[in-house]
Image (cartoon, rainbow, N blue to C red):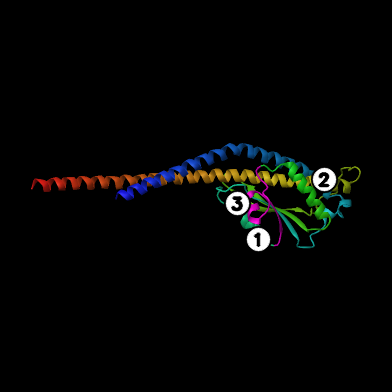
Amino acid sequence: MGADIKALKNRIKSVDSSLHLTKAMGLVASSKIRRANEEMKKSKQYFKSVMAIMDELRTVPECSRNVYLKSVEGERTKLIVVAGDRGMAGGYNSNVLKLYREYPSAQIIPLGKRICDRVGSEFVSSETYSYTEAKELANSLCEQFASGEFDRLGIISTKYVNMMVQEAQIKWILPLSVDSSKESSSMIFEPDAPSVLDAAVPEYVAAFIIACVRESFACEVAARRMAMDSAEKNAQQMIEDLELEYNSARQSMITQEITEIVAGSGSKRR
């Protein structure tokens, strides 16, 4: 009985330590949520502005023969995969990795420690990833695409639905599609529309990448906050159950000791 009580006491201490850890991680995630959401909104607004220009350029007939608007003729796929730097975020990382496994033949550009470790690549943080890094990557990818090193470029990231729901998704960046449903743009491009398109595509790719990375990080901190809330509630419930079991075992031990003392006292009187 004494050993059972000691084991229960040790379990309560262990769960209590985990409770303190989940509370701390939950507070850290909460402190990052506001900034992450603000960065996500800013990057989305910038991407929409760049996309508006690209929409105009895609309707110009002179741009239809541009290398970035060619139809997909091969299956050589390059994928940017955005995962988290840390775990304990519910299904955030596992959902991204599950989607990534659907493209076994694709060339992978990993962002985030979890995916970098999976593919054995040098660590690139998804949390601190900057626009400068995105622009460098975009320039390199555009050069490779233009030279025919791969046929299409996509990005696997996570879509922010709300605080409780985040969905892994894949979006295709290159090649651009020709929008034949709209009339040709009335804008005047200098020196000409194809030249402007060549200059705008790397900006578009960089804006696309940074928007997805920022949205993914907002999803990560939201998922971690919800996971820590759930873990905290489970730990509290477990502590209550263990304390109840501990008190019951302790009461039983006390009752047994009293019974033995009374029994011993009665035998001495005889």
Is residue 146 located in the magenta-colored stretch of the structure? no
User: Of marks 3 and 1, which one's residue comes earlier in the chain?
Assistant: 3
How far from the left and from the top, in percent, is residue 92? Answer: 59, 50
Could you tell me how far apart the alpha carbons at marks 3 and 1 are, in whole angstroms? 15 Å
Asked whether the residues under the numbered discs 2 and 1 touch, taking CB atoms below 8 Å apart as contact, a structural biologist would say no
* Residue 102 tag number: 1
Could you tell me how far apart the alpha carbons at marks 3 and 2 are, in whole angstroms? 32 Å
The kind of secondary structure element at disc 1 is loop
User: Of marks 3 and 2, which one's residue comes earlier in the chain?
Assistant: 3
Residue 63 in sight in this render: yes
Q: Which residues are magenta?
A: 105-127
How far from the left and from the top, in percent, is residue 194? Answer: 88, 49
The kind of secondary structure element at disc 3 is helix
Could you tell me how far apart the alpha carbons at marks 2 and 1 are, in whole angstroms? 31 Å
**Closest to the observer, 118 or 212:** 118
Is residue 111 located in the magenta-colored stretch of the structure? yes
Q: Residue placed at 71% from the left, 44% from the top? A: 210
- Residue that badge 3 annotates: 93
- Residue that badge 2 annotates: 200
Residue 51 in sight in this render: no
**Closest to the observer, 196 or 98:** 98
How far from the left and from the top, in percent, is residue 8? Answer: 36, 48
